[in-house]
Image (spheres, rainbow, N blue to C red):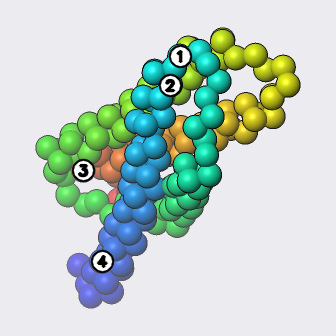
Amino acid sequence: MNGQAEVEMTTSRARYSWLLTMQAIGSASLLSQCYPLYSRLLDDPGHVQVYADMPIVTVLGLGIALVQSAHWYRVFKVALPVRDAHVVLGQLVLFTSRLAFIIASALFSLVLFRHLPEIDFGQHWGGYVWRGLLLLAVLFSVFCFTTELERLGLALRGQERTPDD
């Protein structure tokens, strides 16, 4: 490898690491809100919940923005910098990706199957729409992060190659 290629690879790894870290921080902030919401929903099933107060919405909004911006920048601008296979590490990354999505999916399932059928959408339908869209945005953001981890895990196992291979 010549000097220029080494510099480019180091830069690519640094950019990828930074973007993956931003996605991880954003996803962690989203998932940190899932447990308290999940507990509250389980404590009072089938009733209208008013727990989407401003601090929670702010954390969710910032987490969504962080994950989405880092994810899409990575997809269009930064290639996976993995060159060598690390099978065990790849397997652990794949496990982490599935676990993160299970946590977010549990909250979505609880809302969809337990709370949605019980809600009277009569006069407050606007509040339900924005909460539903917020929940979908959280789920989609966690999905984007988990697909990024899956790409990385497969690359570490040697099953996905970068475009320049």
Answer few, some or many: residues within 10 Å of disc 1's Cα (few below 14, many 20 plus, some between 14 and 19): some
Label 3 to label 2, Cα distance in Å?
Answer: 38 Å
The answer to the question of whether label 1 and label 2 lie on touching residues, with beta carbons closer than 8 A, is yes
Foreground disc of the pair 4, 1 = 1
Q: Earlier in the sequence, mark 3 or mark 1?
A: 1
Task: Give the residue type that dot 1 points to.
Answer: Pro
The picture places residue 61, in percent across and down from the top left corner, at: 60, 54
Q: What residue is drawn where x is 22% and y is 45%?
A: 90
Label ID, residue 10: 4
Q: Secondary structure at mark 4?
A: helix
Label 4 to label 2, Cα distance in Å?
Answer: 46 Å
Foreground disc of the pair 3, 2 = 2
Q: Earlier in the sequence, mark 4 or mark 1?
A: 4
Foreground disc of the pair 3, 1 = 1
The picture places residue 97, in percent across and down from the top left corner, at: 34, 40
Label 4 to label 1, Cα distance in Å?
Answer: 51 Å
Q: Earlier in the sequence, mark 4 or mark 2?
A: 4
Label ID, residue 156: 3
Please state, as top left, top right, bottom left or bottom right, where the C terminus lies in the image: bottom left
From this viewpoint, is residue 68 visible?
Answer: no
Label ID, residue 41: 2
Label ID, residue 45: 1
Identify the image quadrant of residue 39. Answer: top left
Q: Secondary structure at mark 1?
A: loop
Task: Give the residue type that dot 2 points to.
Answer: Leu
The answer to the question of whether label 4 and label 1 lie on touching residues, with beta carbons closer than 8 A, is no
* Residue found at the very far right of the displayed protein: 123
Label 3 to label 4, Cα distance in Å?
Answer: 17 Å
The picture places residue 118, in percent across and down from the top left corner, at: 66, 12
Q: Nearer the viewer, residue 159 or 15?
A: 15
